[in-house]
Image (cartoon, coloured by chain):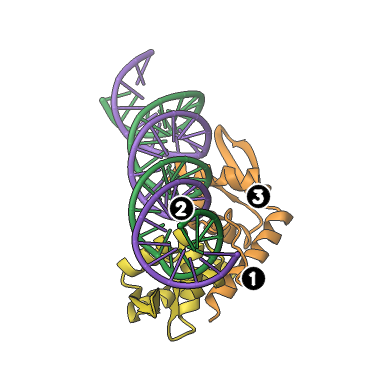
Chain colours: A orange, B yellow, C purple, D green
Amino acid sequence: MLKPLDPLLHSELRLAIISILIGVEDADFVFLRKQTAATAGNLSVQIDKLSTAGYIEVEKSFVGRKPRTLCRITDKGREAFKEYVEAISEYINI
Amino acid sequence: MLKPLDPLLHSELRLAIISILIGVEDADFVFLRKQTAATAGNLSVQIDKLSTAGYIEVEKSFVGRKPRTLCRITDKGREAFKEYVEAISEYINI
DNA sequence: ATAAACAAGTTTATTTTATAAACCAAATTA
DNA sequence: TAATTTGGTTTATAAAATAAACTTGTTTAT
């Protein structure tokens, strides 16, 4: 039987966010927006879901006088991603 | 930029169906139901979507007096699956 | 100095999906 | 012959994704 797919990660935008964050120390909202080409609203919502689940940490600050939202993957997020990769591999490895 | 994920395949149950069908000549409703552990209603709906999209062919007949719904992947479905695998690989290959 | 445009998000509303529950017709079993 | 099972479909509900509208503050042009 195929492994179930973590619904939090089985979402195009959230998976893209995690995929980006896993390769870098951290990334801010503006960078994620450019990389994913998502609308700001959608990105905001999905960052929130990942943060609520504890898959990423979000740090809000100001750079000069502009707000800045920094995102970083957590150990829990890394582990969830690893499991997701294992699971989906079953589906795509014939 | 990450490739977009075909929304028709980026669904746990539809992906499972295609994943199964790609490895066999054909499979019937009962078999798919056992393999996926999906409810009959959900399976019925998702088979319909894949069929409407031309990703699978559905052949209804009777065996003795019991109805039988046979599913088989099409070339279009095979091609879509191949592209989906290429796309999602970008997300999961760190 | 002030109006217009832009930046960085958030909130709310709408659309789309997924899923389950209810249903149906025919066959089988008790 | 009544109840249950089989093999589904249809309809209703819950959840998700997405877009549109809004907010707060900043920069630019007049």
**B12 shown above or below D22:** below
Q: Give, as a three-letter code, the residue at label 2.
A: Lys
| Residue D13 or residue A20, whichever sits in front | D13
Q: Looking at the rendered structure, which numbered label has been put on residue A86?
A: 1
Which chain does the residue under circle 1 lie in? A
Whichever of labels 1 and 2 marks the residue nearer the N terminus, that label is: 2
| Residue C5 or residue A12, whichever sits in front | A12
Residue B71: tell me if it is visible: yes
Are dots 3 and 2 on a single chain? yes
Q: Looking at the rendered structure, which numbered label has been put on residue A56?
A: 3
On-image quarter of the C terminus of chain B: bottom right
Q: Residues within 10 Å of mark 2 (few under 14, many from 20)?
A: few
Are dots 3 and 1 on a single chain? yes
Say what secondary structure mark 2 lies in: helix
Q: Residues within 10 Å of mark 3 (few under 14, many from 20)?
A: many
Q: Looking at the rendered structure, which numbered label has been put on residue B17?
A: none
Q: Is residue B53 left or right of residue A70?
A: left
Q: What's the distance in space between the residues labelled 3 and 1, CA to CA?
A: 20 Å
Which chain does the residue under circle 3 lie in? A
On the image, the x and y values in percent for residue D10 come to 33, 53
Residue tagged 2: A34
**B46 shown above or below D22:** below
Whichever of labels 3 and 1 marks the residue nearer the N terminus, that label is: 3
Q: Give, as a three-letter code, the residue at label 3.
A: Ile
**Residue A48: quarter of image:** top right
| Nearer the camera: disc 3 or disc 1 | 1
On the image, the x and y values in percent for residue B74 come to 35, 80
Q: What's the distance in space between the residues labelled 3 and 2, CA to CA?
A: 19 Å
Q: Give, as a three-letter code, the residue at label 1.
A: Glu
